[in-house]
Amino acid sequence: MTPLSADAVESDHASPAAAVRRRRIALSYLLTAVLPALLALGLLVALAMSSARAPAAGPAAGGPADHTVRLFVAIAVVILAARLFGGLARRVGQPPVVGEIFAGLCLGPSVLGAVFPAAGDWLFPIEIRPVLQGLADIGLIALMFVVGQESRRTPLKGHGGTAMSIAQAGIAGPFLGGALLAVLLYPAWAGPRADPVVFAMFLGSALSITAFPVLARILDEKGMTRTRVGRLSMLCAAIADVVAWCMIAAMAAVAGQDSPARAALTVVLVVAYGAFMAGPGRRLLARLFAAIEGYGEGARLLALIVGLLLSSAVTSAIGIHAIFGAFIFGFCCPPAVIARQAERINALSGALLLPFFFVGTGLRTDVWRDGLSAALIGVTLLVTAVALAGKLAGPMLMARSSGLSWADSGTLGVLLNARGLTELVLLNLGLSLGLLSDRLFVALVLMALATTAMTAPLLRLAGVIAARADRRGT
Amino acid sequence: MTPLSADAVESDHASPAAAVRRRRIALSYLLTAVLPALLALGLLVALAMSSARAPAAGPAAGGPADHTVRLFVAIAVVILAARLFGGLARRVGQPPVVGEIFAGLCLGPSVLGAVFPAAGDWLFPIEIRPVLQGLADIGLIALMFVVGQESRRTPLKGHGGTAMSIAQAGIAGPFLGGALLAVLLYPAWAGPRADPVVFAMFLGSALSITAFPVLARILDEKGMTRTRVGRLSMLCAAIADVVAWCMIAAMAAVAGQDSPARAALTVVLVVAYGAFMAGPGRRLLARLFAAIEGYGEGARLLALIVGLLLSSAVTSAIGIHAIFGAFIFGFCCPPAVIARQAERINALSGALLLPFFFVGTGLRTDVWRDGLSAALIGVTLLVTAVALAGKLAGPMLMARSSGLSWADSGTLGVLLNARGLTELVLLNLGLSLGLLSDRLFVALVLMALATTAMTAPLLRLAGVIAARADRRGT
């Protein structure tokens, strides 16, 4: 490299050598910059003068550019609304997911569409829906991956027996409640493709689900993750979730297929895929992640994302929803190795992808479609009451008789009762399979919102009761 | 909380109190878990027996589920292919972007479509294209945001005068070359909507562009970021990029509109928006980021993403492409405050979103469409030669006469000659505006690939020459 800096040349005006250099620079500048620029300008002018051709036919912009505007505005609004409502929910002592679900409802026909019908149509035109749906789908499988991971990571040691009996109480009771509800609601509220048995299985599963991510976040926020009741509730939720998703997978296999033979094949394939992943697949994944150890975090993240997409594609191809493949993949990935990457996927999809799932749900939820009838309100209250009785009361009684205090038992029941996002996943599945009527979907979405929103106040109540009992004890 | 642990209860078999407890647990288990489960099962069986209804009409899965499979598989393939080809490129001493562009071409009709026509159609069916395009669009504006940020962050101090004259040489020469080419190619190679003047402006701009991100990455990899020639080339590229994108914006404003009045309005609005953002907008952004300082990194990232989407939507609504809004927003954001978030956006979109842009370009590039004619090869070679003469030779001569050594001047020319991704952005714009014919698009894509791929070998060559010159000097 030359020791002479260009700036030294520029500032060095005195010597004759510098004068020569300056002249050389000026000449080069004229030749390489000014002259070509002038020639190009002249050429453009000449072209403009000689071109008698009319400006090209029709507007090039308009159509696609307009979609881009809508798409970007819609994405910005969705992400921002989820964040704002999530923040507001946190302010009033609620888990953010309550605010995020609410944000979705607000952007849909229930609120925005009812107040400004034009705004809803402008913000989410039909052309950009596939993109929003695609983002929601990706967010959804990321969520189910995290749910699978967390079910796996929960240590089974110690409370195994107690947790198992409480978890069973937390499934059987709500399932029975849901099945009974199904008998009642089937004639007028079932979807166009609902068979009575499948409808009963679906409603039973819908009431027995627990929102594992919400549960984990609440425990984390209240500093309860390491307490006994906290660990017990995580464990119960993990067991209940695995059982519930197996039932739902079986139901989806039956409901999604047109012939019994096809349904049987689907069940066999699902079981085969699940067994493969739980056994050799798990070992293969562990070996894969060990093999790419040296390529850094990026490679691990890439392997996770690609694996997640492919596993989701497999179950989708088999004939049940992609979420099952995502759950299985999350359950089978070695948690210790990928903890950080899983955390990144979680944070990213939670902030940037799941909002589209909330909004998708909100767009499908129209409380005014058949008028806000007394029947809708009645069914919503009934479903919520059955959900509470099954998921809150059942595990609470089982926990109490297992030796926990009333306050701890209550806390456990309240925690398992939070249905949050996971319930919405299931409800959207039911709607897409044609098991739910539009208005039953609305009632169940409201039930999910209510049972999640009551978690925080009920927990505080249980805390107050526990504090009083402690004071009486001392 | 009770001091009695559930496990202590379970293991404590001897005492009569424990026996009572065990009996109580068993009873609760029967009542809350076993009995409801049996009842639910009975109910399901009863429903199955009584339901004479035939299974529901038609398959629910199939259509949408099938799209999900394709979508997930396509996303996995695209991300994986970009990463693999990028890694291979790095192995052979090329910047990863060369491999990534190549991956895009391989997945398009040029390679995969030519070898397995069915595979291309299966992998990217028409139904999922909007989603892939949406991901590409988001990746694109993230890229242009980063380009804007980097143009801004380059310090102007020190080499101002030299850099300015070299940058001008790096624009004027290629622009003239492009305009001359335009006169030659217009009759047979222009797009259906190309006016001669706009076509000349487009080709001129297309040859004068520099790939700022590629340049920055190459300098970083070679440890040249702090050397004088490294800083000078960054500065030249930054100046040239700002000038080139202004010209392109003007051209897009004219080309995208159907009437001169509408075009004039667009130009006025673009200038007004640019002036607003460069002045008050910049101060507002600085104040905004100062105001949300306390809300943590997540809030800053959110503000960036939302602002980026909205700024892109603004320019798109004005009538020029969204990329200009993204560039302006990136240029106007306070670099010191958001450096980390910008880095995250860059890493994320580079790995997970830009691959869709490469593949989108690849899908539009079909070298076999009109046969691999001698004309196509000839035009590709001609365009590449003009691009080299303008962008490599011009700045090299200007740098040499400004006092840099031949080796440094050559290095500078070679660096500015890398067009990479930024060129693809521009070419896609030209195609969508109807300025380029399909085959000219192919020729220019190949030119972009060639000028980028020759950067690394030419840099090594310049290094060897410099080393020899040094040895002669000592």
Image (cartoon, coloured by chain):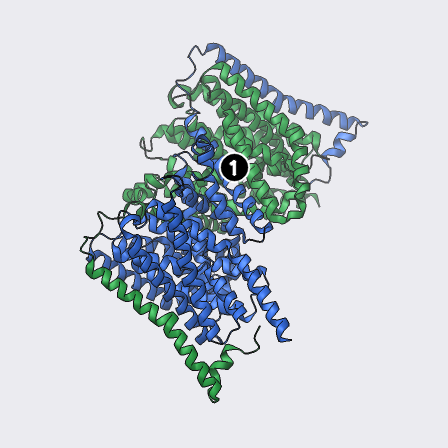
Chain colours: A green, B blue
- Which residue position is annotated with label 1? A141
Total labels: the figure holds: 1
Position in image of residue B300 (x %, y %): 48, 58
Which residue is located at x 45 percent, y 70 percent?
B397
Position in image of residue A116 (x %, y %): 29, 44
Disc 1 sits on a residue from what chain? A
| Neighbourhood count class around disc 1 (C-alpha, 10 Å): few under 14, some 14–19, many 20 upward | many
Rendered view: B112 above or below B267: above
Position in image of residue B356 (x %, y %): 45, 44
Q: Quadrant of the C terminus of chain B?
A: bottom right
Rendered view: B10 above or below B130: above
Q: Write down the quadrant of residue B178 in the picture.
A: bottom left
Residue A460 visible somewhere in the drawing? no
Which residue is located at x 46 percent, y 20 percent?
A257
Position in image of residue A201 (x %, y %): 51, 22
Rendered view: B207 above or below B358: below
Label 1 is placed on what type of residue?
Ile
Which residue is located at x 39 percent, y 18 percent?
B57
Element at label 1: helix
Q: Quadrant of the N terminus of chain B?
A: top right
Please name whichever residue, B33 or B313, is drawn nearer the observer in this view of the structure. B313
